[in-house]
């Protein structure tokens, strides 16, 4: 195997139902409902998904939601900005955990 993630896995994702058709159907029904037009537009949802895909580091999701964001009318600037939002949140979450270290260090030093 020359690479862990294979591009052909993404279009074949529905085949995951071979392991448990009932659970797969429930998941895909839910997934479809989540991404349907609602209080948020499908473009907004695609941009959110693209940002989350980067935060959770899912290459399949990055490919899928890059394509979906473009199909829903997002441009490269909007997509890049969405990724920066995810980056800021992930970085901030890491940094705020530094408060735990700070409290612990102060207890040990004093």
Image: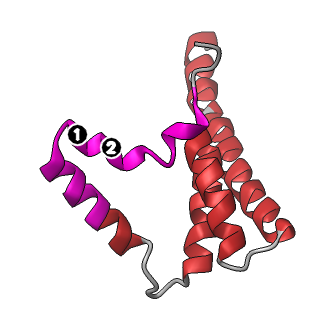
Task: Find numbered disc 1 in the image and state the secondary structure of the residue it sits on.
Answer: helix
The answer, for residue 39, to whether it is visible in the render is yes
Q: Residue at x 55, y 21 (%)?
A: 104
The location of residue 3, given as percent across then percent down, is 63, 20
Q: Which residue is mark 1?
A: 18
On screen, residue 41 above or below 49: below
**In this image, 11 relative to 76: left or right?**
left
On screen, residue 77 above or below 85: below
Q: Which residue is mark 2?
A: 15
On screen, residue 37 above or below 109: below
Q: Is residue 71 magenta?
A: no
Task: Find numbered disc 2 in the image and state the secondary structure of the residue it sits on.
Answer: helix
The location of residue 7, given as percent across then percent down, is 60, 38
Q: Which quarter of the picture shows residue 55? A: top right
The answer, for residue 58, to whether it is visible in the render is no
In the rendered view of the protein, which quadrant contains the N terminus?
top right
**Tags 1 and 2 touching, CB below 8 Å:** yes
The location of residue 20, given as percent across then percent down, is 16, 41
Residue interval drawn in magenta: 5-29
- Residue 7, disc: none
Q: Residue furthest left?
A: 22
Q: Is residue 15 magenta?
A: yes
For mark 1, does the 10 Å Cα neighbourhood hold few (<14), some (14 to 19), or many (20 or more) residues? few
Dominant secondary-structure state across the stretch colored magenta: helix
For mark 2, does the 10 Å Cα neighbourhood hold few (<14), some (14 to 19), or many (20 or more) residues? few
Q: Which quarter of the picture shows residue 102? A: top right
């Amino acid at each position: 195997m020359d690479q862990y993630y294979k591009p052909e896995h993404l279009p074949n994702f529905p085949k995951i139902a071979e392991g448990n058709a009932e659970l797969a159907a429930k998941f895909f029904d839910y997934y479809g409902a989540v991404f349907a037009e609602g209080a948020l537009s499908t473009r907004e949802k695609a941009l959110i998904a693209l940002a989350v895909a980067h935060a959770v580091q899912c290459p399949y999701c990055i490919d899928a939601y890059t394509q979906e964001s473009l199909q829903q009318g997002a441009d490269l600037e909007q997509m890049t900005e969405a990724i920066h939002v995810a980056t800021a949140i992930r970085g901030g979450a890491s940094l705020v955990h530094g408060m735990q270290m700070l409290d612990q260090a102060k207890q040990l030093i004093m």
